[in-house]
Amino acid sequence: MPWVWLSIRVKDEAVSGCETLAWRLQAAEARAAWRLRQGASTFALDECSVKVDDPRAADPRVALQRINTWQSASRTLVSEMMILAGQVAATAGECLVHACPVFMSLGKPGIGQHLAALGRLILL
């Protein structure tokens, strides 16, 4: 099966158009609001779309477009469920008195260790 990249707009339409995903989105939005009231921090990580008209050309035209994903329904749903899954794992590990390692990588050696410590604080 070929891999297909869906735009943020198409993903958001799919989330809004599906009753099952729509109520999950509402729950994710409510949980995000609750976390913010509890003192959680948020930050936007926009994406970039890179398009090359003719990669075989001697001097190909490259177009860069900034994509604001901050207010995306699909992004909200996925990110909030990932945060919830991490919290469930941390809570289960705490209840079982079992250390739960946090693995993060940004491609730079040493940074993952510092972010892992930060990740443990965020989940508390």
Image (tube, rainbow, N blue to C red):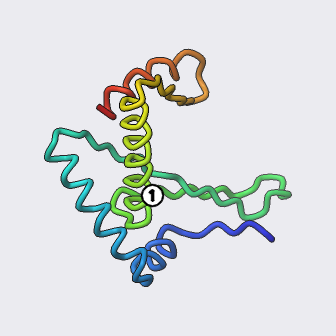
- Residue that extends furthest to the front in the rendered view of this protein: 96
User: Left of 7 or right of it: where is 1?
Assistant: right
Query: Residue 90's spot in the image, x, y percent?
Result: 40, 35
Q: Is disc 1 placed on a helix, strand or loop?
A: helix
Query: Residue 121's spot in the image, x, y percent?
Result: 32, 26
Q: In which quadrant is the N terminus drawn?
A: bottom right
- Residue that extends furthest to the top in the rendered view of this protein: 110
**Based on the displayed image, in which of its 4 quarters is residue 16 positioned?**
bottom left
Picture residue at 42% right of the left edge, 74% below the top: 21
Picture residue at 49% right of the left edge, 28% below the top: 102
Front one among 57 and 123: 123
Amino acid at circle 1:
Val
User: Left of 83 or right of it: where is 112?
Assistant: right
Q: In which quadrant is the C terminus drawn?
A: top left
Give the residue number, with chain letter if any, for mark 1. 78
Q: Is residue 92 above or below residue 70?
A: above
Query: Residue 45's spot in the image, x, y percent?
Result: 41, 46
Q: Is residue 5 above or below residue 102?
A: below
Front one among 69 and 64: 69
Query: Residue 83's spot in the image, x, y percent?
Result: 39, 46
Picture residue at 36% right of the left edge, 32% below the top: 95
User: Left of 54 or right of it: where is 15?
Assistant: left
